[in-house]
Amino acid sequence: MKKVTFLLIIILAFTATSLKCLAQVEVKGTGTTGATKTFETKNGSNSSSLYIRDDGNTGIGTTTPGYPLDVNGIIRTNAGIKFSDSSFFTSTRYGGVYTVAQSNGDFITITAALNFINGLIPGAGNTFLLRVMPGTYNENVQCLQYVHLKGAGKYVTTINGTVTAANNCVIEDFHILKGVKCIGTSPTILHNRITNTDPSGDGIQITSVGGLGRPWIKENEITNCLGWGISSIDVGSDFWAIGNKIIANGTPAGGGGGIFCNKNSPTISNNIIDYNHWFGIEMLGVSGSPTEPTIDDNVIGHTDENSGGIGIYMSGYAEPRIMANDIYINDIGIFINQVTQPSVIGNDINYNRTYGIYCNSQGATKRAVITGNHIHSCARVAGGAGIYIFNADPMITLNNITQNDNAPQPVLPDIDYSTCAPGGANNPMISLNVFDIINRNAPPAATGSFNVTSNGVIIAP
């Protein structure tokens, strides 16, 4: 009998370890309204810990849930929260998230939401996300520090007013109709569509009044402003403009254009600066407050091609670094005026109507440097040239300056320095270039050597 009992125990143990237990649990309430309880758990103190109503609202720490999930306490997640519009945030990124919408939001105006957040004391450790739903908001907006102001997209969320930026704020995904002002502030301006149809109104205006104005301006569309697309007018307003489309700004009669920088040193990189009036980029400097921007990898074109438009213009104490840009279909590609001393390096300067480069500067303390550029098809009217030098002494080296004599115009020079007198004070240095046609006095006023034609024949500077 003992052996049978032992064998039965072994069989039962083996069977228990081999079977899987499958179960479904259904709890059905007795009512159909939010006032009826379907399920509840309680702790040892008889307080409710989990409460589910018949309408599906679930409360944790509350018996009166007003939402599908209503928590009386702190929620912890190791990943984050994702909204139905695919936006995402983590609890460590924002101290609070609020929504502005024309219906069913926390606020119906951006200003009301910012006033509320201001009372919560935003700061470096207490930042806020303010989400603005589609619609047009007819208000001027005064941003706050440490607030991320985020629209639902630059084609659906419109601010019909002026946005005044704050330090350490983000302005993202809006259509802004009256421009952005950075008055001594350094915000991040990202993925917006910005215009300003006020007389002489700028898309983004930067000053250093009351502080440094050093905003990040990235991947915006800045178009159809009656003033400048971006205007930076003070010492210390050294902005970064990267990856923007700056198109059709300024007016034929009123001036303006793409970008203006005065007495500061911005970084202007990888932008499309196209179809602007007067200037693609204009820079001015004064003694003691020079302008020293870095301008690289931009496309600058169609600047009033038939009426004096200039791709890049500089005057006064300016010492820009102009590198690897595509400068095309302007009236003048680059205009180097007194007493600037730029470095023009490695650009494609093509199809400009009158001059590829016009140099009229001996520099303040250093000579202009023009090196490693490809300049062609830049003389389509009488008097034009690939490079035109007017009583100046630039150093011109390692350039390919050919095919600037476009038919059916008369034969026009690749280089013209006929205004420089032999033995005079302004003698350009021309070495190691490729060019075919040069206009000069006799004897030549330039120094230099090792130049050749496009056929490899040695040609004098």
Image (cartoon, rainbow, N blue to C red):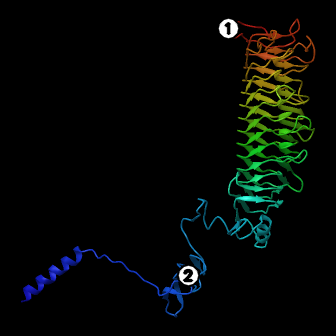
Residue 451 vs residue 427: left or right? left
Tag shown at residue 59: 2
Residue visible at 73% across and 54% down in the picture:
174
Residue 313 vs residue 246: left or right? right
Measure the alpha-carbon separation of dots 1 and 2. 85 Å
Q: Amino acid at mark 1?
A: Asn
Q: Say if mark 1 contacts mark 2, CB within 8 Å.
A: no
Tag shown at residue 229: none
Residue visible at 72% across and 7% down in the picture:
458
Residue 235 against residue 342 in the figure, above or below: below
Looking at the picture, tell me which residue is in the foreground, 108 or 299: 108
Image quadrant where one finds the C terminus:
top right
| Residue 125 in view, yes or no | no
Residue 451 position in % (x across, y down): 74, 12
- The mark nearer the N terminus, 1 or 2, is 2
Mark 1 burial class by Cα count in 10 Å: few <14, some 14-19, many 20+: few
Mark 1 highlights which residue? Answer: 455
